[in-house]
Amino acid sequence: MSGAPAGRQVQGLDGLRGLAALYVVLFHCWLYTFPGYPDSSAPRWLDGLMYGRLAVVFFLVLSGFSLAISPARHGWRSEGVAEYLRRRAWRILPPYWAALCMSLVIAWFVVPASHSGPPTGWSMVVYGLLGQDVFTAPTPNGAFWSIAVEAELYVVFPLLLFVRRRSSAAVLVVLVTLPVVVRGLMAPGGTPVEGDNWLTPHLAPAFVAGMVGAAVVVAPERVRRLPWGWFAVLAAVPVLVLGVTKGSVWTLTHYFWVDLAVAPAMTMLIVAVATGRPAVLVRLLTARPVRSLGEFSYSLYLIHLPIVLAVIRRVAPHHVAPGLPTFWFTLVLALPVSLLAAWLFSRLFELPFKRNRSWNSMVEAGRSHWVGKGAGIRGRLPDGQAPETRPTDEAGTSGPLPARTVVTVRAPATGSKKDCAQESPGR
């Protein structure tokens, strides 16, 4: 299929990541301030902050979409399983392990991350190996559950690509979604009781929905120009109506079905942004503040919760009353601290791994950086001191300072010759 050029960058995806991560921060500020979830004691006008789980589902849809863009442009073929897994590990694990160390320290010495108490040695093993979706251990960071789900989906992504390449999008969707639906229908009451792990099979359809949506990026123009934004609204309306009719508590206790129902709407929203519509939304998502937020959204997701908990449980009780005053206090203090800390964290543990694809590349980049700074220092001279010069050699190379050469030019007015000194830029 003819479509977008292979090198075209899809605008707006970083902005979507940034806003979703910011919503998760607000959700946790709400969740840990007001007890009683899902029947929270928070004011009803704050109910819009209680759906943090759906933001994580959106992350999964967006991950499937982003990872599938390049294979979609190349006949649903990847760069090779080993190289793909290496690059995913290189991108995801270093920031995660750094955030794990930070979370362990805070959970041990400042505030535990869960009601089950401080993390243990078993927690270090389970979370260090990203096994928290399979094994249960006291968590050092309540946000880490979704990282294990994503990691497992990354591992099976090459297999999902193989199915998509050999069959069709419909076959892929049915193979992944049908077992989940059957399991849900067979559960007592028609809704499985959700635990703390074994969530990957349930959430895999959301990831696959994003993969399927990536095909639009390389589709013919007539497909790309369809009103995907309106399609997203139409797909979301039934879910919203059901949620409003049944109430927030029913919605939160039926996430098993809500996750499946909302994934198509999320996919079509991402497709709409990827195709440049609606223009107002794309301009918002590509504005510098939102785009910058997206650049460190992974770091924000990883480290914000220990900061939020420390503010709510260790700082706020000394200054404000419980309830709404604590919520506002947390927003004013924990939100900017989380943003600043995540920005600094990304500079140390995330961006270096995004900009360099191997240890050798990172070491070389660091060496070039410091060599460049050293050359800049050596190049500075005291005020009024002329730079030292030397002529070029036979090979045309020169030292670190520009050479001064004498050239002969003819004055156009008189035809006489005059010598003039001219700075040569060297080689």
Image (tube, rainbow, N blue to C red):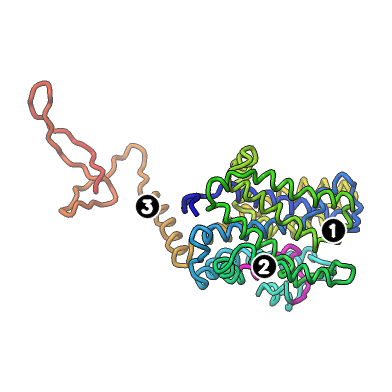
The image quadrant that residue 178 belongs to is bottom right
Q: Is residue 246 left or right of residue 202?
A: right
Frontmost of labels 2 and 3 is 2
Pick whichever, 130 or 416, lies toward us: 130
SS type, badge 1: helix
Look at the image and say whether residue 147 sits in the magenta stretch.
Answer: yes
- Residues at marks 1 and 3, CA–CA distance in whole angstroms: 59 Å
What's the residue at 51%, 50% (across, down)? 9
Upstream in the sequence, badge 1 or badge 3?
1
Counting from the top left corner in percent of width and height, residue 238 is at: 80, 50
From the image, tell me which residue sits under label 1.
252
SS type, badge 2: helix
- For label 2, the crowd category at 10 Å Cα-Cα, with few meaning under 14, some 14 to 19 and many 20 or more, is some
Residue 103 seen: no
- For label 3, the crowd category at 10 Å Cα-Cα, with few meaning under 14, some 14 to 19 and many 20 or more, is few
Counting from the top left corner in percent of width and height, residue 338 is at: 70, 52
Type of amino acid at the residue the image marks with label 2: Cys
- Residues at marks 2 and 3, CA–CA distance in whole angstroms: 36 Å
Look at the image and say whether residue 60 sits in the magenta stretch.
Answer: no
Frontmost of labels 1 and 3 is 1
Residue 190 seen: yes
Give, as a single range, the part of the protein colored magenta.
135-154
SS type, badge 3: helix
Counting from the top left corner in percent of width and height, residue 258 is at: 79, 58
254 up-or-down from 418: above or below:
below
Q: Which disc, if any, is residue 101?
A: 2
